[in-house]
Image: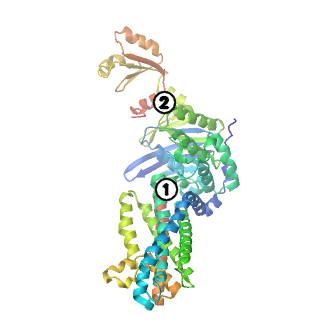
Amino acid sequence: MSIPTIRQGSLQLVDAAKAQSRGALYVAEARIRTMAKWIGIIFAIAIANPVLYLISVGIGLGGLIDKSVGSVGVDGVKYLTFLAPALLAQAAIQGTMDETVFPTIEGFKWNRTFYSMNSTPLSGAQISIGVFLAALFRASYTVLLYFGVMWAFGALESPHAWLAIPTSIFAGASFGALMQSVAAKLEDENYFFVVLGRFIMMPLFLFSGTFFPLTSMPFFLQWIGWISPLWHATELGRYLTYGHAISSTLMWVHFAVLVTMLISGLILSAHFFTKRLAK
Amino acid sequence: MSEYLISARGLTKKFGDFTAVNGIDFDVSKGESFGLLGPNGAGKSTVMRMIGATSQRNAGDLTILGKDPERNGPQIRAHLGVVPQQDSLDMHLSVSENLYIYGRYFGLPRKFVKGKIEELLTFAQLEEKRDAKVEALSGGMKRRLTIARALVSEPEILMLDEPTTGLDPQARHILWDRLFRLKEQGVTLVITTHFMDEAEQLCDRLIVMDKGTIMAEGSPASLIKDYSTKEVLEVRFGSDRNQEVADKLRAMCERIEELPDRVLMYTEDGESLLEKIYASGLHPKTSLVRRSSLEDVFLRLTGRTLIE
């Protein structure tokens, strides 16, 4: 069989300006292709998580709570309605975490794929943004499926329940961007996952006003909620879905915290990616 | 654009107090196969990363395809094909998908890349592995895929950092065959290696590097001519006795090198030298006459072997 002649035509073939302007999208395209390899697992997680939570906490615990509080409700509504925006936001946070932290460590350390990406016209910042965009795509997919399960369980009594979808993705984006910048700095990830799982993710999930209003906790623990994107997104979600009472000032604070986390995460991440690749 | 594709003057790279590349000069012309030969830690890969426009120099001038990598990194990288020391393939994707996404990074149209993949799979002898996961490939196959990947954008310069390190002899020969074809087809190659046979086979011209500086420059043949003799006689007297007889041997030829396990004797005629040794009453346990290689050049220049 004849062996093809290798041409040298990149000067005509490659449009450097085009490659530069769309770089982040190419990275996202490659990342989504990789995710598609375990789409089955992503789907299973997105369905199984809400099913388990809604049965145990929502129906089991929720039934008990609704009975004991009577018509007053939790924050004026049924427990499941109260819980839904928090669970959705948590799912988004977990989804973006998975698709920012792991690919970042893998790209720098396990497979060094970021280095081969960087030897094309792609810049460090574009690689960083591309990974983030793909993670956002994954979070949206997960949240939509999660939402579908909630609907099937009849957990969405408010006509505005769907508004928790954007607030959840917002929470995922903020936390994901920040964690991506942390992952970009990691040289040794061994302890990171232990700390991340037990001392960051778990407390955030439990103490962000997820299962009960933040104010029910002792004051000295409430700060966990204040720094938690989950709490800020949940508060916004509760306001939008069932009219949970918050002052307009506080609403802006929630919004500002999430935006600040998102923007600083993106900037730091782009910066750390660029520096580490240029070493 | 200057007549050279790559031109370096006083090129310097420091990592803190450590000077990895210390003010080196070299040029690479179109269609040339240019080599950087030297042991591990000589600064070859650092030079490659600077030519690859991913790592910036600390001093000196560097022009690649007429541009300065400090200002035009992405524009330069758009026309380079880089084969790094570690394959850094996407382990989750198949062979053809790896080629596909890499083509996309250059902004190449999907249709073009799909056609190109067929060509490259044939070139890299990976047609039957197109849908295989990269994880399942042998070391040699991964290497060929990495080279195919670097060719997807039809680069002006193909850069290979230690292309056959870690491969078994058979895989290495398959790879050399492919690289030699590229050289024959006139592809501009920049290759780093610490294997002298690789440098001899693949490079038109090379620089010998040690500790961040250039020790010598020229074609493999001219380097051997300039820094070594035509033949080398290798003799072994046993580890304890090599040193003992070294002084006697030194008197018999132009130059000797004492290695831990053997003595290398530099001469124009190995067989007659061996006869002379026997005539003097010395009886080496083993002896071997061979032609001089780049390994001898390196030994002459640095007093050390390439692979330590």
Q: Which residue is mark 2?
A: B294
Look at label 2 and name its amino acid: Leu
User: Label 2 to label 1, Cα distance in Å?
Assistant: 37 Å
**Residue found at x 33% / y 79%:** A221
Tell me the number on the disc at residue A154: none
Q: Residue at label 1?
A: A107
Left or right of residue B139: residue A70:
left
Image point 47% across, 22% down: which residue? B229
Residue A26 or B30: which is nearer the viewer?
Answer: A26
Q: Name the secondary structure under disc 1.
A: helix
Q: From the image, which quarter does the N terminus of chain A lie in?
A: top right
* 2 vs 1, front mark: 1
Q: How far from the left and from the top, in percent, is residue B74?
A: 58, 57
User: In percent of the image, x 67 and y 45: which residue is there?
Assistant: B118
With respect to residue B242, does B47 lie above or below? below
Image mark 1: chain: A
Classify A213 as above or below B134.
below
Relative depth, front residue between B42 and B166: B166
Image quarter in which the C terminus of chain A is found: bottom left
Instruction: Give amino acid for label 1.
Output: Gly
